[in-house]
Amino acid sequence: QVQLVESGGGLVQAGGSLRLSCAASGRTFSSVAMGWFRQGPGKEREFVAAISWNFGSTYYADSVKGRFTISRDNAKNTVYLQMNSLKPEDTAVYYCAADATRWGTRNIRDFGSWGQGTQVTVSS
């Protein structure tokens, strides 16, 4: 199993930017993909973005495409989520996930490892 620790959340005004980090330890090399999910107040957890640990390929939710960028630093075993042009509706707890069972999935059940989450609040 992969151990994940997120950081970088906080309070930002609409239109601002934040960068989240997810430090991974364990069998990161065997993870098909790592990703970010979020859960807003009163909402279900939803997919945000994912990246191939080995090849760097990415895919995004339509709601964040063009504003968020997922990347990874293999040497540091870290995945990042750069969030630009933030909107109040981006307010959520953001979770890092790993051990995806298949490429391209957006289903939380297909990710086997999770971090504890980091709060992102966007004020209007």
Image: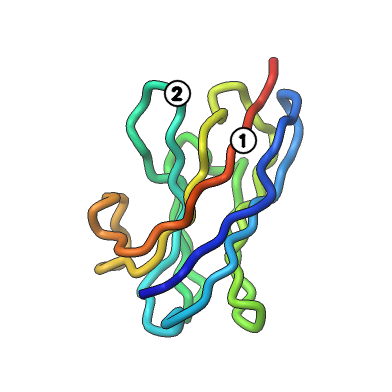
Residue appearing at x 50%, y 64% in the figure: 4
- Badge 2, how many Cα within 10 Å: few under 14, some, many 20+? few
Estimate the x, y position of residue 110 in percent, counting from the top left: 25, 59
* Above or below: residue 89 compared with residue 61: above
Name the residue carrying label 2.
41
Q: Is residue 44 above or below residue 65?
A: above
Q: Amino acid at mark 2?
A: Pro
Per the image, label 1 sits on a secondary structure element best described as strand
Q: Residue at x 61, y 70 (%)?
A: 78
Indicate left or right for 108 with 22 as reference.
left
Residue 24 in the image, given as x and y percentages of width and height: 53, 71
Visual colour scheme = rainbow
**What's under tag 1, amino acid-wise?**
Val
Of the 4 image quadrants, the one containing the N terminus is bottom left
Query: Quadrant where the C terminus lies?
Result: top right
Which residue, given by chain and number where applicable, does mark 1 sit on? 120
The residue depicted at 44 percent of the width and 65 percent of the height is: 34
Mark 2 → mark 1, Cα distance in angstroms: 11 Å
Viewer-proximal residue, 103 or 42? 42
What is the number of the mark on residue 85?
Answer: none
Q: Is residue 62 above or below residue 81?
A: above
* Vertical placement of residue 19 versus 103, above or below: above
Please name whichever residue, 12 or 102, is drawn nearer the observer in this view of the structure.
Answer: 12
